[in-house]
Image (cartoon, rainbow, N blue to C red):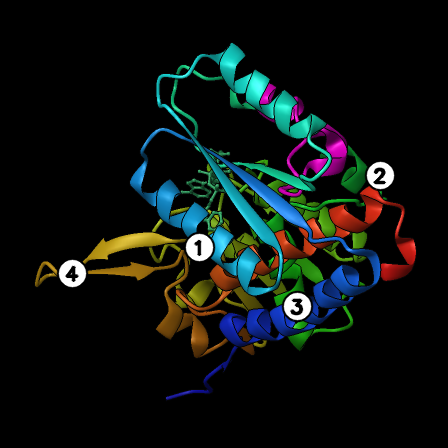
């Protein structure tokens, strides 16, 4: 038995963030009469989406914000959905708009997201938000990678010059993750399904972020000794007894023998994502009213 890594407790870190945020929200409400308000557009009856939106709304309310869910029929037209976004853009009481993805196939999610008022884009997926991050002037950063960054900094406050490898290049996770690490002066490699010799690429990483969606793909011998490993993946794995459990993209027990610190799944990145969404919503409530002193 070798060394065992420190477990990065995303649940505890997210809970601590929420306590701080709740205090800031209470002050904003007291001093300025503002209750940050987050509107969720939920199209159709996708079971996982319904659970995600319910959790997000519940946690918004728990920190003193308002969470309003707008359920829309699964066969809604693109035009009707765009009209709903326009209505929320124009509503002065709404600070943040989140369109829960994925949308049904007949809808163009890119067009819907681009129609959100950029000042209300608390999910950080609007082209302007993405461009500002690229230009090192981030306004709203995609919630999952921002949460990963907090977890990384909890164990590695100094990132300059470290080798970071991000496996996955999605617009929501992999790409913004790579930009955040680059903006923090890491030397960044982005790997994906066409990358060759992934184990060797991963083994160069002081910081390894896996955002792939393949159960336990990253094995123990891919890990550089002393690395920080962040596992974004959420995968359902059925064992020989037919019992299902949730696992990440990293074989946790193997990787923990070599890594210095590693996030568990569940209880790592997941809880941070909602905390960062609420953080962005607080920012939106302040920016929209020029309350820069409250930031
Ligand atoms: P996507 O499916 O959009 O992207 C997956 C990426 O992984 C793609 O870039 C793809 O490459 C790459 N990939 C696929 N197979 C391989 C492979 N064999 N080797 C190397 N790279 C590969 O997923 P997301 O980015 O949206 O999500 C990734 C994972 O994170 C999922 O499990 C998802 O459930 C989870 N997730 C968790 C969140 C949380 O809060 N914890 C939030 C969001 C996502 P290519 O581009 O070439 O196709």
| Residue to which mark 1 is pinned | 55
Q: Position of residue 133 (x, y in %)?
A: 77, 42
Q: CA distance from mark 1 to mark 4?
A: 28 Å
Q: Work out whether mark 4 precedes mark 2 in sequence or the reverse, and give the earlier one.
A: 2
Within 10 Å of the Cα at label 4, are there few (<14), some (14-19), or many (20+) other Cα atoms? few
- Disc 1 packing (10 Å; few <14; some 14–19; many ≥20): few
Would you call the spot at circle 2 few (<14 residues within 10 Å), some (14-19), or many (20 or more)?
A: few
| Residue 59 coordinates in the image, percent (x, y) | 52, 60
Q: Earlier in the sequence, mark 3 or mark 2?
A: 3
Circle nearer the N terminus (3, 1) = 3
**In the image, which residues are magenta?**
110-128
Q: Mark 3 sits on what residue?
A: 22
> Quick check: marks 1 and 4 in contact, CB under 8 Å?
no
- To which residue does mark 4 refer? 239
Please tell me whether residue 144 belongs to the stretch shown in magenta: no
Dot in front, 2 or 1: 1
Residue 116 among magenta residues: yes
Crowd tier of the residue under label 3, counting other residues whose Cα lies within 10 Å: few below 14, some 14–19, many 20 or above: some
């Amino acid at each position: 038995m070798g060394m065992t890594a420190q477990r990065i407790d995303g649940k505890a870190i997210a809970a601590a963030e929420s306590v701080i945020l709740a205090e800031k929200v209470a002050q904003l409400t007291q001093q300025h009469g503002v209750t940050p308000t987050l509107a969720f557009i939920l199209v159709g009856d996708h079971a996982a989406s319904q659970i995600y939106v319910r959790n997000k709304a519940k946690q918004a309310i728990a920190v003193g914000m308002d969470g309003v869910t707008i359920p829309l029929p699964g066969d809604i037209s693109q035009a009707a959905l765009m009209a709903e976004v326009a209505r929320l853009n124009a509503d002065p009481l709404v600070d943040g708009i989140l369109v829960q993805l994925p949308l049904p196939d007949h809808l163009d999610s890119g067009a819907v997201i681009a129609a959100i008022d950029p000042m209300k884009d608390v999910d950080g997926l609007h082209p302007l938000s993405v461009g500002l991050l690229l230009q090192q002037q981030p306004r709203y950063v995609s919630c999952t990678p921002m949460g990963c960054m907090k977890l990384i900094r909890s164990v590695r406050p100094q990132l300059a010059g470290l080798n970071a490898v991000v496996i996955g290049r999605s617009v929501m996770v992999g790409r913004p993750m790579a930009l955040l690490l680059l903006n923090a002066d890491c030397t960044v490699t982005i790997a994906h399904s066409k990358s060759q010799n992934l184990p060797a690429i991963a083994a160069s990483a002081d910081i390894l972020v896996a955002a792939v969606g393949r159960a336990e793909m990253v094995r123990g011998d891919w890990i550089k000794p002393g690395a920080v490993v962040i596992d974004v993946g959420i995968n359902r794995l059925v064992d020989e007894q037919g019992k299902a459990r949730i696992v990440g993209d990293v074989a946790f027990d193997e990787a923990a023998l070599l890594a210095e610190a590693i996030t568990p799944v569940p209880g790592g990145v997941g809880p941070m994502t909602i905390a960062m969404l609420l953080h962005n919503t607080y920012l939106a409530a302040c920016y929209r009213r020029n309350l820069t002193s409250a930031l």
